[in-house]
Every structure is written in structure tokens, then in C-alpha cells.
Amino acid sequence: MSAQKLNKMKHFKNLKDIPAKDLRKIIIDAKKRKSFRKKLNNLEIDKGAPLKGKLLIQMFEKSSLRTRLSFYLAIKQLGGSTLTLRPDELHLSKGGESIEDTAKILSNFGNAFMLRTDSDEKLEEFKKYLSIPIINGLSPSSHPSQILSDVFTVEEIKKKPISKLNITWIGDFNNVLNSLIAASIKFTFKLNIGCPRNYQLNKNILNYLKDNKNKIFLFNDPKKAAAGADVIFSDKVISMNDKVDKIKKLSHFKKFKINKKLLNFAKKDCIFLHCLPRGDEVEESVFSSKKSKVWQQALNRVHVQKSILLYCFGKI
């Protein structure tokens, strides 16, 4: 790949590594692209087919529904194509082929690589050897495409910058929350976090908070966390491949379940968002209510990931 192309190429690995102005550009572009598609069906291509001839290679080491579908439609609507690989089909997992060699093959055949992985180290090593953009489709420490899309959804529904809103997370300290914390710093919004006392942020995130001015508050009382919220986020208490005592962990989070009583502490027009799939952390009366915007949230992944792809290719 030429030096000029490498200079334009950008990775999308973690929100904390991307300038705030670039994240805002992605959201602005996604808003425009969504408005242009009002009369188009899912498989129709955007005007100008900006990624015509481009191949996105995806690899999933963990199960996926929304990320897989949304990236497929994202590259398709931009005029490109996608190829999905399973790690158990590759020499990488069974034949002892190195990540370095695999990355070089991917770079020769594809134009971008999206990885959902069970290892942050693997994500970093692929980035080291790829000569094409890498996109983090979820890793143990972050889920950047999900949260950037969620920022888009919040602003779309509330019709104001997220910096003017009070955001609350009630649930476990996980990769989605890590990205929400990064977004809070990049987009300068107030973030309340409600979680049981015996659960804590990891050291890397705590250090990141210390190094950045922020408006982030931790609560062990879900009512205090929900007070005055414009938006309440949640996620499954038991994450994928979570190696814990599930019964014990669920008992710790029993008082943190999202229900109508808890929402009474938030603003009257508060909305509920969840990255899905759901578990026992939210009552059906909330999940299926008018306050729940989870289906709009899921669909917006397509629009934002189109703009993420364009960002990675240096087109915005």
C-alpha cells in the first residue's frame, strides 16, 4: 500500500484513541446518510457508491447478531462487499499460523478488517501487522461502534447535543460501560454509574479517568444514579463467556433491576437504551414501554457504521 493511502487510513479501535472532532464528524455524516435513505430499501446502494469495489472482511470469535448484520448492510449500502470468516475455519486457530502472516493475507485480499474478539492483545497485534484499517467489533475492554451509535441515537431522540443531557448507566462494569466512559469524556456529558459496592472499574479505566477532566459519578444506590436522568443505559449482568458464580452475581444486582419504580427517579421524558441481548436486568414493563428505544437503537448501528467505514477509508 502506498504511503499516501496509509496516511489517509484510520483505525477504529477504541473511542479514547480517536479525536473528539473526528467522532463528531462521524455522527454528522451518519445523520446525513440516514436522512438520504428514507425512500430506499435495505439493499439499495447510496448515491455515488462511495465504497464501490471495497471488501470488508469480518471475523467473529464471539457470537454476534446486531454487529454482524449492521456491518453487512453498512458496506453493502456503500457499494462494497463483505466476507465473514470463522476462526475455527482458519489455520490461525488450528494450524498454528501466526497473526502476523494472517494479517498480511487479509491485507492483500481485503480493504478493511472488522474483528470481534475475546482478546485485546489479539486486536492490538492484528493492528500492528495489518496494512488496512482494523475496526473493533467488540473486545473484552470496549465496544466502540455500539456506543458511538448510541450517542447518535440519544441525540436523534432528544434533539440536542448529548453534552446537555444527564446519562445514567445501571449495571455491571463491562466493555460497553468502558466505551460509554470514554464517550463521556470525548463528548463532555455527565455520566452517573450505578453498581453494587463490591464491583469496581478496572485499573486502566480508573487511570484514564484520573488523566481526563470529566463529570462521572459512581453510586452504590440505583435510585441516586437514576436521579434526574435523561437516558438510562443497561446491559446483561452476565456477559458473554463470563466465568463467575452466576447465581451469586445475579443476587448482587437484584436491587439494580430496571423497573418502573426506578424510572420514577429519572426525568419524565427519560428513555431506556440497551445494547442487547437482554437478560433479567430489566423488567418487561420497561423494556416494552414507550420509554424503551432499543429497536431504534439497534437499527441505527447500520447508519453509524457506514460512517465509521468511511472514516477508516479517509473519506470523512
Image (tube, grey):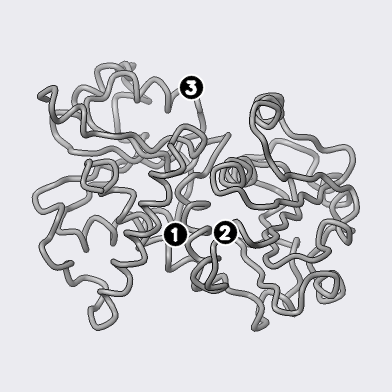
Label 1 close to label 3 by CB (< 8 Å):
no
At x 43% / y 68%, what residue is drawn? 299
As measured in the structure, the alpha-carbon distance from the residue carrying label 2 to the one carrying label 3 is 24 Å
Q: Quadrant of residue 48?
A: bottom left
- Tell me, for residue 275, which label it has, or none: 2
- Tell me, for residue 310, which label it has, or none: none
Residue 287 x, y percent position in the rendering: 67, 74
Badge count: 3
Q: Secondary structure at mark 1?
A: helix
Residue 296 x, y percent position in the rendering: 49, 73
Looking at the picture, which amino acid does disc 3 mark?
A: Glu
Q: Secondary structure at mark 3?
A: helix
Label 1 close to label 2 by CB (< 8 Å):
yes
As measured in the structure, the alpha-carbon distance from the residue carrying label 1 to the one carrying label 2 is 9 Å
Looking at the picture, which amino acid does disc 2 mark?
A: Cys
At x 49% / y 52%, what residue is drawn? 146
- Residue designated by label 1: 66
- Residue designated by label 3: 121
Is residue 166 or residue 14 the one in the foreground?
166
